[in-house]
Amino acid sequence: MPDRLELAVVVPTFNESANVAALVAKLDQALAGRSWEAIFVDDNSPDGTADIARELGRSDPRVRVIQRIGRRGLSSACIEGMCATAAPVVAVIDGDMQHDETLLPRMLDALEGDETLDVVVGSRFVEGGGTGEWDRDRVAKSAFATRLSRRVLKADLSDPMSGFFMIRTGIVRDLVPTLSAIGFKILLDIMTASPRPLKFIELPYVFRTRELGESKLDHVVAMEYLIALYDRMFGRIIPVRFAMFSAIGALGAAVHFVVLALSFGLDFITFFQATIIATVVAMTFNFFLNNALTYREQRLKGAAALFGGWVSFCVVCAVGAVANIGVASFLFDVEHGDWRFAALAGILVSAVWNFVLSSRFVWGR
Ligand code: GDD
Ligand code: MN
């Protein structure tokens, strides 16, 4: 066995307790004769995945564990794992054995044999690969996601959605500040972050069926994919969080109008009262939507935290509204006329104010 560490296999896990030991056994078999370590990056799984991996690590020091507390995310977990090794080469592989670990030695040989090569990608879409037992629905969704990725990806990768690949560690380390780290698609993130085209090859594999545990791919993950694409395309011009915050703000304005119209329609409510009702409803709507989407990584949970957050959000927005009115009427006075410009400027100022202050004081840590 080579005496210098060749490879780190990064395994992102969330609730994979039933798979950890079997995966390590498979790695041990596949990588016989190579010098490797496995790094499980676990987001504090309630099923005790990290404990099981640590227990394995006590008898086999090649098994390491990073346990992240209070954070979630496949991509960000992979990045942390890749940065936590001394090995010159890292692989990322799912913890549920759906990826074909027997490919690892060939991936490693390819990188060790060709200094100019940067990445080896496990692909389901080259000759010999396949998606296994996927139903038509999932095949169609995956194909659609792949098509969307072409908008940000220049390279001619057959399977940019793949979560199974091997890369030189230094490349990832250098790219970290420019990675979006959002969602599931870490390979796409890396390939599109690199200022120079990365040289890659693809090796075929067939996606296996998951035997134990459950998939974490859901609607939130799908939405995160779109957010990550937005981030790559326009994130430098309008940061993704601000864009979401503003879009939700616009929805809130629509809610405001509807509630205002409905409550003013009742004859015992004055316009002033209806405005107060509409404002409170719209702010509450915005608070919960931002909590669920814009700030989902630092989401407030539990009645007390939610109530405190809601109160401070309302205070921030109230000041924002005053700023809006102040700026708009000031501009209207000096400009003597174009009320649309004045209104727009007022809205922009209050949007920035609400965003900056609430990200600091409502969802800040
Ligand atoms: N640390 C951490 N945090 N790990 C996570 C999280 C998370 O929030 N979410 C999922 N994982 C881990 C799972 O435990 C599993 O080991 C791996 O990431 C893949 O998650 P699955 O839920 O099994 O995803 P999948 O099978 O639907 O998707 C896989 O296949 C895609 C191919 O279309 C992933 O590997 C994708 O990356 C891959 O592109
Ligand atoms: Mn899976």
Image (tube, rainbow, N blue to C red):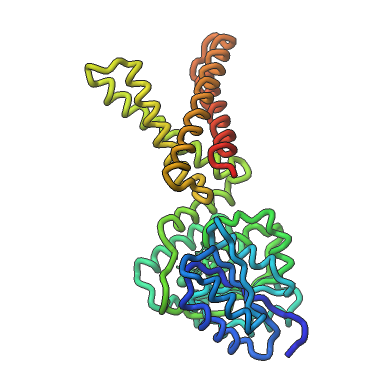
Q: Which of the 4 image quarters holds residue 25?
A: bottom right
Above or below residue 331? Residue 126 is below
* Quadrant of image for the C terminus: top right
Q: Which of the 4 image quarters holds residue 104?
A: bottom right
**In percent of the image, x 40 and y 63: which residue is there?**
141
Residue 290 percent location from the top left of the image: 47, 41
Residue 252 percent location from the top left of the image: 41, 33
Q: Is residue 232 visible?
A: yes
Which residue is at the front of the view, 10 or 176? 10
Which residue is at the front of the view, 168 or 273? 273
**In percent of the image, x 57 and y 11: which residue is there?**
335
**In percent of the image, x 58 and y 80: which residue is there?**
56
Q: Left or right: 283 with respect to 333?
A: left
Residue 233 percent location from the top left of the image: 58, 49
Above or below residue 61? Residue 333 is above
* Quadrant of image for the N terminus: bottom right
